Image (cartoon, grey):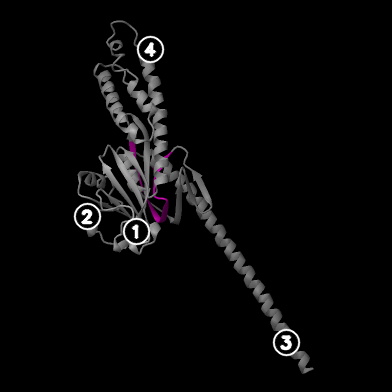
Amino acid sequence: MHKKAAIEMQFNWLFVLIIGAIILLLVGSLLFKQKEVSTQSKNALLTRNLDAILSGADASLNTVSVITLPQSKIEFQCDEYRVGTFSRKMEVMHVFTPTTLEGNKLITQTLEWSLPFRITNIVYLTSPAYRYMVIGQNQLAQEAFMLFPNETFTERSDSLGSVKSRGEQKIRLIFFDDSVANNKVVPIAFAKMADKDVTALKASGTLDNGDIEFFGKKGDRFVSLQSTSYFRKETLFGAMITDSPSLYVCTMENLFQKLGIVAEVYKIRTQQLIASYTQAGNKCSELRASAYSTAAIDILQKARFAKDYFSPLSSATSQLQRQNDQAQKQSCATIY
């Protein structure tokens, strides 16, 4: 009898343990699902809010905003951004941003890109987690440093040797000298940081146009990723903000595509003006071959994101501006 009672008691305890484990498993599963649903809901809301933030930034010219968000991780690809499993296309916006933005604050800035008429607004995104370090003594280094708004974590140094860590989460070193090259040693202050958290850019030229080279980090060495170019200070600033050559090139190609579309609109307008000024002796009719020439607009319309186009593009932009001024001085309709 004692033996039978002992077996029954052991069975009862085993039954209690099994039931308890099942209950704990169910409760844990419910809590996990609730957390997952909460996270998905937060990510969906953040995605919708980010849509509104980007649209508002695109419409707000020459403004800088610091926006507080829920703690989040936003990943960017060409024409797309992702928050968790939610993604959105950026159909009409032109955005320069790092590949990943983490934290609870977002810095937005908007600048106009004009050649010489307005092509589009460019939106720049970053966060206080990024420290931008401009290195160099030449004029371009000084001018480039001034492009950063006060709200960003940005500093300038004459040389790489004087750059120290300040506890930043991510560092972007922007060189306007020759102190960075493929396989060159990363400063010891940043060598122990994760490779993805240390990036660099080398730039040379003027504010109008020049060459750039993107670098990543592998171990304690810089690694060259891609060489390309920039056109106008707004795109140089974009190269300094983003850490990805593919994101940069994608945005530049989209900008030049938009340039072609807008130039086509102004070409049609110019042709309409030429057709309307046909009366002999009219002072505006006498400007048809000069102020209303479409040669400069043709160059703008056919331009592509390639350095070979930059010099003709600069000349065409200046020429079109002179044509517009000429028409304006004669009280005739302007091209733009």
Q: Which residue is situated farthest in the bottom direction here?
A: 2
Q: What residue sits right under mark 1 in the picture?
A: 221
Q: Nearest to the eye among marks 3 and 1: give it.
A: 1
Q: Can residue 15 be seen in this view?
A: yes
| Residues packed near mark 4 inside 10 Å, few (<14), some (14 to 19) or many (20 plus) | few
Q: Where is residue 179 in the image (x, y as percent from the top left)?
A: 26, 53
Q: Nearest to the eye among marks 4 and 1: give it.
A: 1
Tag shown at residue 275: 4
Dot placed on the residue nearer the N-terminal end, 2 or 1? 2
Marks 4,1: beta carbons within 8 A: no
| Residues packed near mark 1 inside 10 Å, few (<14), some (14 to 19) or many (20 plus) | some
Asked if the stretch drawn in magenta spans residue 33, the answer is no
What is the C-alpha distance between the residues marked 3 and 2?
A: 79 Å
Marks 4,2: beta carbons within 8 A: no
Residue 189 appears left or right of 47: left
Tag shown at residue 159: 2
Q: Nearest to the eye among marks 2 and 1: give it.
A: 1
Name the element at disc 2.
Answer: loop
| Quarter of the rendering containing residue 206 | top left
Indicate the amino acid at tag 4. Ala
Name the element at disc 3.
Answer: helix
Q: What residue sits right under mark 3 in the picture?
A: 9
Vertical arrangement, residue 324 with respect to residue 314, above or below: above
Marks 3,1: beta carbons within 8 A: no
Residue 111 appears left or right of 22: left
Vertical arrangement, residue 24 with respect to residue 90, above or below: below
